[in-house]
Amino acid sequence: MSEFNEKLLLPNIPDLHKIEVYEQNNGYSGLRKAIGMTADAVIDEVKKSNLKGRGGAGFPTGLKWSFMPKQSAKPKYLCANGDEGEPGTFKDRQIFGFNPHLFIEGSLIAAYAMGIKAVYVYIRGEYVKWIKILQQAIDEAYSKNYIGKNILGSQFSTDVYIVRGAGAYICGEESSLMNSIEGERGYPRVKPPFPAQVGLWGCPTTINNIETLANVPLIILRGAEWYSQIGVPKHPGTLLFGVSGHVKKPGVYELPTGSLLTDIIFKHAGGVRDDKKIKAVIPGGSSTKWILGGELDGVKMDADSLKAYDTSIGTGGVIVMDEDTDVIKVLARLTHFYHHESCGQCTPCREGCGWMEKILNRFIAGEARIEDVDLLLNVANNIEGNTVCALGDAAAWPVQSVIKKFRGEFEKRVKKISSEKKYVPPPHLISV
Amino acid sequence: MVKITIDEKQFEVENNLTIIQAARQNGIHIPHFCWHPKLSVSGNCRVCLVEVEKMPKLVIACATQVTDGMIIQTNSGRVVKARNAVLEFILINHPLDCPICDEAGECKLQDYAYKYSVGESRFEFDKVRKPKRVELGPNVMLDTERCIMCSRCIRFCDEIVNKPQLVFTQRGDHVELTTFQGQKLDNDYSMNVIDLCPVGALTSKDFRFKARVWDMSATDSVCVGCSRGCNTKMWVRNNEILRLTPRFNSSVNQYWMCDHGRLNSFKNVNAANRVNAPMFRKDGMLIDVGWDEAMARATSELKSFKKNEIAAFGSAHSTNEDNYLLAKLMNHMGVHRIDFVPHIEDAKQDSLLIKADKTPNSTGARLVGIKSDTDEYSYRAIIDDIRNGKIKALYVLDDDIAVVPEIAEVLPKLEFLVIHASNENQTMKYADVVFASSTYAEKHGTFTNFEGRVQKNKPAVSTLEHDRVLDGMPLSRLDRFGAHNDRWTKGIKRDTRASWRIINSIAAILGAKWKYNKCEDVFNEIASTNSSFYGLTYENIGVTGAMIQKSQEQVTVRS
């Protein structure tokens, strides 16, 4: 499986973002083929391919599509999630930049399969450049009747709209994303009901990641059978690994699932800057749990393999930290992010993230006490699992993980006198 | 129906309920801040986390539907731990200013902190600072730091009043409640957010800093601001009403009341312009006299007129009992010109609670006999006959009829005017005898609302007529345990009487054979002699009222 080195999502074809070039390279053939199939057959094909969502949770895409009601009095919607707010994650913008039509084609196939008449592409507002490229591509696709009324002469019609985010991490969470599209405050919704029943404007809705949808045309065109054999069977396909941190060649590398983490870092990303040792790696975006430098040998980058290391593939955003890294500072910076981005709707995340940051800053200032290590861990544990959305967990996991793997570093940072410094009540309060 | 188990006890409940609803129906309290029975579920406070067998995570009881065979733990180790954690989180940025907070004593957070939290905080940093003393609107103040972001107030404005005026801004622990740009929280029901607020973030501009809640007694009462008859609690300290709050009644007002009723239907009780003693006119001046003197003057004067020279105005502000006895007195005197003056404001009504009829008892007044069978005897005809001199003496139950200009114009023509009044008013200028009557807050009685619901009203403020302890009135901590040197135990007790009791005495002087000791007796007589009230007793009206027998159209009050 590791011999597979074809680039499916980001092939090295110049000007692929132009529709003529895309068409010359089999572009929109997947859509054409899908329209010749029944909607159910398209969903079955995606189910058979075993495609898993690329946004972090890894939910089976075909199964998600099958949750959409076949008959619905209300319109149905597809939201393509390009908010890409997780630190260390920058893969979707490569698709927008280099292969936007592949994503558009995937969205159209998805819309066809689920009977959807409107696709909303939610993109983080900072991606001005990529939004322009995608809009250009959408306009071209309209002009060639890949989008719009009676697509390719069929009965199938759909529209594609771009919605720009206004700068909130929470809006990458699917239910907040829907609220944001509706013009509401970016607050996650309580589930159930799930979006397939009550989604955008109360209508059945599916939310897919950009990269997930970009895989769809290839599955339809070349078959589920072919696709399911790429990478590891339970999590097939290629992933866009966004490698950042202390590597010589940071960037996005498309590799099959199950690739060795060491290969990604050393073969593709050029190894560690100044050839230092690796202290730790975050495998899938900032909310995934850390892997120690010493544990890297043999780590394979797919959902199941990473579970064995008590972490997850997340968004495939690999962050490499060398031996000189101050992990507590890194953790404090990440926690600052989660504190800053907590939407504030539910109690544990709203209050807990700020508290964690304050404790971490005390470590950095050298003012922490030995009890603060467990206090910090306990605050993280109290957030995890008790929040409306998964982003509470996302804030807790890095803290739990770093304390577990680097407890010694925390203990070293404790204020020296703290263990002797006991509370002594003022004389007038001491009872005789 | 589904079978569920909560804390080892089995229940059969409807299957469309959430866990918190099912538990509540069966008397099990699951702590909650953001959930409210009449608002949508927001699921944000996380205090109602419970453990459900076979579910990996704790779930929020407010948003999780019951299913058959569900086994729920509301006090397992995991639940207690999570609840403690959530309470600790809520408290880290919450000011610990209970000693100066109006909510203290009726604060959900304070109660839960005592009941469920570990009792100490591990948080040693500066709390997040936010704006204090924010004027959200004419009646509501916000302390943003106390807000726990439960969103009840926002949902109330959005969902119940249909006036979205409140919103959260900012993110995370910097979230702030505020009004929409350029707006104020000024809807007609804005003060309900004060009751909904589980903490002291939203307080009443009218009431704040007036009293600790445990120093007041709370008496079940009925709002007299309009014909809806919202159920209320009347909060009294030192024999003075300090605030009204709505009392739940699913058939009348749910959990709500309007700001107008809340602010304007009690202030007259303690006002400086109370009529504290009976008065009669001597040498052109109204002077304070004793009850016996006033009664003697009134009865002797009334006797000097012919029956058809006398008319009476009952009052839709007064109780069924007051009006019934007035009608009975007039009947005894052979007077047939009796009606009441309606107070309708068509421009001031809505589809939620507020009714155009600004009196609490038009329906009841008519049913107990304050009405004319023909237009010839209606209140307009009475006014006309005063103007043309046919009617020379007028008896007016508690109603400031002179606020109606056409009535004020004819009143000087009367030779004799006797009124019941609780406060100095316009009509007094023309009165010859004034009986100092008790307000609705000082007497027993019943009102019949616009749809025919009879509701009981109890005294919250004591007059010389009753004793708080002996007469079973609600007591505050101070009423119960206050010593003479305590500051709030020396309230004023006025020498006023309930109107039905005043009429009772007059009737006796005029030779009537009837006498009532209790308001209850009057009502029970109404119920046994008036088919509309058939089947009701003072007892069985209960705390939420009971419907009369009349069909809807028969009780419709003319406008």
Image (cartoon, rainbow, N blue to C red):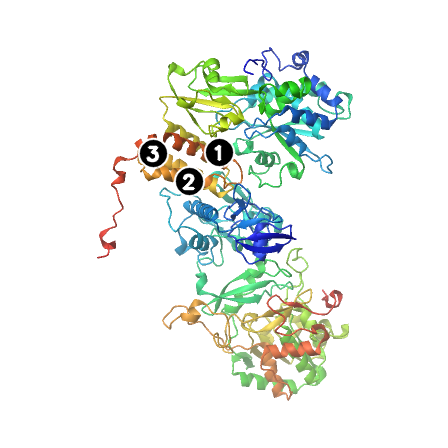
- Above or below: residue A50 compared with residue B418: above
In the image as oriented, which residue stretches furthest toward the bottom? Answer: B511
Q: Amino acid at mark 1?
A: Ala
The answer to which of marks 3 and 1 sits earlier in the sequence is 3
Q: Nearer the viewer, mark 3 or mark 2?
A: 2
Gap between marks 3 and 2, in whole Å?
15 Å
- C-alpha distance separating marks 3 and 1: 21 Å
The chain under label 3 reads A
Foreground: B544 or A6? A6
Q: Secondary structure at mark 2?
A: helix
Could you confirm whether marks 3 and 2 are on the same chain? yes
The residue indicated by pointer 2 is A379
The residue singled out by tag 1 in the image is A394
Mark 1 crowdedness (10 Å alpha carbons): few <14, some 14-19, many ≥20: many
Which is nearer the N-term, disc 2 or disc 1?
A: 2
**Left or right placement of residue B396 versus residue B43 in this view:** right
Residue at image point 64% right, 66% down: B359
Above or below residue B18? Residue B528 is below
Residue depth check, mark 3 versus mark 1: number of the one nearer the observer: 1
Q: Which quarter of the figure is the C terminus of chain B placed in?
A: bottom right
Q: Can the viewer see residue A129?
A: no
Looking at this view, is B114 or A147 the one in front?
B114
Name the residue tied to disc 3.
Answer: A363
Q: Is residue A369 above or below residue A254?
A: below
Could you tell me if the residues under marks 3 and 2 are in contact, i.e. CB atoms within 8 Å?
no
Q: Position of residue B161 (x, y in %)?
A: 61, 51
- Alpha carbon of mark 2 to alpha carbon of mark 1: how far? 13 Å
Inspect the image, locate mark 3, and give the three-letter code of the amino acid beneath it.
Phe
* Earlier residue among tags 3 and 2: 3
